[in-house]
Amino acid sequence: MTTRSLAKIDAEIARTKEALANVKGTETEVYARIVGYYRSVRNWNKGKRDEYDHRKMFVYDSKTLPENGAKAEASAAVSPEAETVCSGNPVRFEMFVRATCPNCPPVKEYMSQVTIPGKTFDVDSEAGFNRASELGIMSAPTVVLFNEIGAEVGRANSTADLEAFFEAKEPVLC
């Protein structure tokens, strides 16, 4: 092990700072999907920018992905805690809707035909907003399905998601 004097360390620090000050490059342009199309993130308004900052990025390990691509996409919607207990059929649901939501009526209609009990939350109310916040719900409509031990087994945001979940032999969202 070589010993360096304080003067040598200070000289290295000064050289490193000088090298960092002279770094040349260009700003990276980040594009993301917003309301159906891709656009530069730096051009988004404040509200959309805040929404973007709250997004969760998923990293897939190709060794653990299932063979079927559709199941791989759906599995990203399940939280790591739910993954460990994601078994059994759903025995209850919680549905999060808004009065002004154009996509909520078809989901409400679909869930009225389902035989499992559930509760509907209006996210415009304080109680509904608080419950949605607890579960990390960021959009309406969202239906959260729970198994017999109260663990989340899936989430759906459309009638297509719900149909895929309830018609599959094995739940697609698990």
Image (cartoon, rainbow, N blue to C red):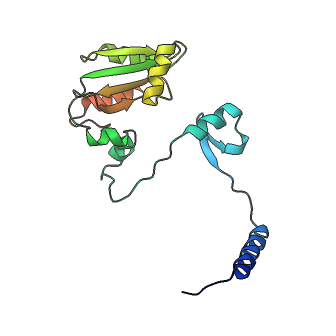
Residue 172 image position (x, y, % from top left): 30, 37
Apparent side of residue 172 relative to residue 107 in the rendered image (left or right): left
What residue do we see at 24% from left, 16% from top?
115
Give residue 23's quadrant in the image.
Answer: bottom right
Residue 47 image position (x, y, % from top left): 66, 31
State whether residue 150 is above or below residue 126.
Answer: below
| Res 105 visible | no
What residue do we see at 52% from left, 18% from top?
102
State whether residue 124 is above or below residue 155.
Answer: above
Give residue 6's quadrant in the image.
Answer: bottom right
In the rendered view of the protein, which quadrant contains the C terminus?
Answer: top left
Residue 80 vs residue 77, the one in the foreground: 80
Apparent side of residue 69 relative to residue 126 in the rendered image (left or right): left
Residue 99 vs residue 132, the one in the foreground: 132
What residue do we see at 27% from left, 15% from top?
117
Residue 107 image position (x, y, % from top left): 40, 19
Q: How many marks?
A: 0
Residue 173 image position (x, y, % from top left): 32, 37
Residue 158 vs residue 125, the one in the foreground: 125
| Res 18 visible | yes
In the rendered view of the protein, which quadrant contains the N terminus?
Answer: bottom right
State whether residue 126 is above or below residue 132.
Answer: above
What residue do we see at 74% from left, 69% from top?
20
Check the image and name the residue furthest to the bottom. Answer: 2
